[in-house]
Image: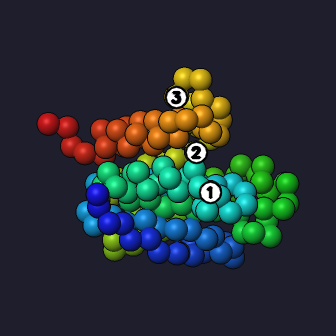
Amino acid sequence: MNQSYDKEVTIQSDGARLSGILGRPPRFAGIVLFAHGSGSGRFSPRNNFVANVLQNGGIGTLLVDLLEESEALDREKVFDIDLLAKRLLTCAHWLRQQLETRGLSLGYCCPKEFIIVPRASHLFEEKGALEKVAELALDWFLKHFLPQA
């Protein structure tokens, strides 16, 4: 098992300060950006579980909230697709500028899009469901991040 290093980061986006957690395994093939459109999703136990599985498999992660805490209460901003997309691109650009992540393959993960586990609810609370999601995500990203033989 790899020992991952997490650090809190702040990404500036048009005056907003976006909070994130950058997870870096000792050696990694790429990085997955987990984007959260409201609240403090970067602390979600489910999202952190999947991120830890990816990190243990050699993939870095950035869990980031696309809205500041005060903005998350504004329903218009929660559903402002243009704003959220712009901030997502800002986070991707930020990753491409950091010494430790520039040049790496970049993948995006919206945790609510994991609909690949039969008989699992959207929160993956069923026994083994979250573990299966994390395993499938790791396999998919490794397949797409690593050069094919």
Residues 105 and 121: in front is 121
Q: Is residue 139 left or right of residue 89?
A: left
Upstream in sequence: badge 3 or badge 2: 2
The residue identified by callout 1 is 44
Q: Which residue is mark 2?
A: 111
Q: Is residue 66 above or below residue 80?
A: below
Measured from the top left, where is residue 34 in percent x and y?
Answer: 54, 54
Q: Residue at x 33, y 71 (%)?
A: 100
Give yes or no for contact between labels 3 and 1 (Cβ–Cβ under 8 Å). Answer: no
* Label 3 element class: loop
Q: Residue at coordinates 52% horizontally, 75% vertically from top-left? A: 8
Identify the residue under disc 3. Answer: 116
Q: Residue at x 44, y 71 (%)?
A: 6
Pointers 1 and 2 in contact (C-beta within 8 Å): yes
The crowding category of the residue bearing disc 2, from other C-alpha atoms within 10 Å (few below 14, some 14 to 19, many at least 20), is some
Point out residue 96 in the picture as x, y percentages from the top left corner.
Answer: 40, 65
Amino acid type, mark 1: Ser
- State the residue at coordinates (85%, 54%): 75
- Crowd class of label 1 (few under 14; some 14 to 19; many from 20; radius 10 Å): few
The disc labelled 2 sits on which kind of residue? Pro
Cα distance, mark 3 to mark 1? 20 Å
SS at badge 1: loop
Q: Is residue 92 visible?
A: no
Of mark 1 and mark 2, the one earlier in the sequence is: 1
**Label 3 packing within 10 angstroms: few (<14), some (14-19), many (20+):** few
- Amino acid tagged 3: Ile
